[in-house]
Image: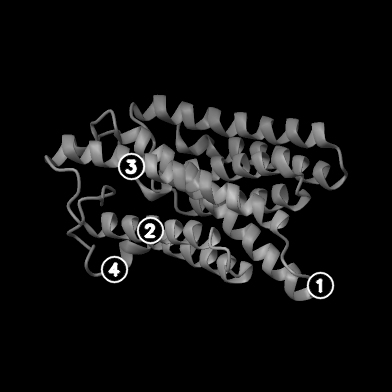
Amino acid sequence: MSWDEFIYFAVAAVACWTAGAWSAWKDKVMTAVAATAAGLLVFFAYIVFMWVSLERPPLRTMGETRLWYSLFLPLAGLLVYARWRYKWILSFSTLMAAVFICINLFKPEIHSKALMPALQSAWFAPHVIVYMFAYAVLGASAFMAAYLLWTQRTDGRRLAGAALMPVDDLAYVGLAFMTIGMLFGALWAKEAWGHYWSWDPKETWAAITWFSYLVYIHYRRLPSHHPAVALWMLIASFILLQMCWWGINYLPSAMGTSVHTYSS
């Protein structure tokens, strides 16, 4: 299995996800769930094949992490749809997964089988996989927040507490997995570099992102909180998350100095 076969798996997976999204709009719940799940299995099969082919977890480069993000976006969409029956969420998750797949097709960033010593740790794969799932769930929460803000603006309706509950649930789940990912990362850092935390640019932005979501959760529990402000806080936190994931690669402070740069 090589990168050349990716397009076949990707097309098959996106076709299944599209069928699932279309079925959701037609109120065919079982078909929507089955088609989306089938696409997830197809895409995950390629990741497994790449894992075997590379003889290492496909998690080293941005291109490889985008594979996981492309997988977890429809998974997060499926979980939201199965729980709350938001018809649009499968369409959105399919569209975003297709965007990341297209980026990988034009810029795959799949490199050699070799792993530098720091990555030869049992904590490497769990840390990155858990983080990618957290990113996907928090992405779903951010876009649900944007959806609620948009409908409030166009319909002139007040944001009801019941409408905010799915957003809160997703934020809680995403922050929980992010916290687990940070703990895995700390254990990995202790094994690789001898200390749990070093305020590397990546770690600094991870802390900023984590605290931003924590502030959102505490703000939402204030009796006097304003729902629209809370939703904007969630969107701002997701923007910070993008800085943590890939934005730091363009910061002068991280170029050539961050221990979290593995693609070279």
The residue beneath circle 2 is 211
Is residue 214 depicted above or below 180 in this figure?
Answer: below
Q: Which of marks 1 and 3 is in front?
A: 1
Is residue 163 depicted above or below 253 in this figure?
Answer: above
Dot 1 or dot 3, earlier in sequence: 3
Q: Which of marks 2 and 4 is in front?
A: 2
Residue situated in front as seen by the camera: 126 or 225: 225
Amino acid carrying label 4: it is Leu
Task: Give the percent coordinates (x, y) of residue 96.
Answer: 61, 53
Disc 2 is placed on an element classified as: helix
Task: Give the percent coordinates (x, y) of residue 247.
Answer: 37, 63
Amino acid carrying label 2: it is Phe
Dot 1 or dot 2, earlier in sequence: 1
| Separation of marks 4 and 3 at Cα, in angstroms | 20 Å
The residue beneath circle 4 is 251
The residue beneath circle 3 is 60
Question: Is residue 245 visible to the viewer in this orientation of the structure?
Answer: no
Q: Answer few, some or many: residues within 10 Å of disc 1's Cα (few below 14, many 20 plus, some between 14 and 19).
A: few
Residue situated in front as seen by the camera: 112 or 4: 112
| Separation of marks 1 and 2 at Cα, in angstroms | 33 Å
Disc 3 is placed on an element classified as: loop
Is residue 46 depicted above or below 175 in this figure?
Answer: above
Residue situated in front as seen by the camera: 96 or 173: 173
Dot 2 or dot 4, earlier in sequence: 2
Dot 4 or dot 3, earlier in sequence: 3
Residue situated in front as seen by the camera: 187 or 230: 230
Labels 4 & 3 near each other (Cβ < 8 A)? no
Measuring 17% from the left and 52% from the top, which residue is drawn there? 198
Measuring 65% from the left and 45% from the top, which residue is drawn there? 77
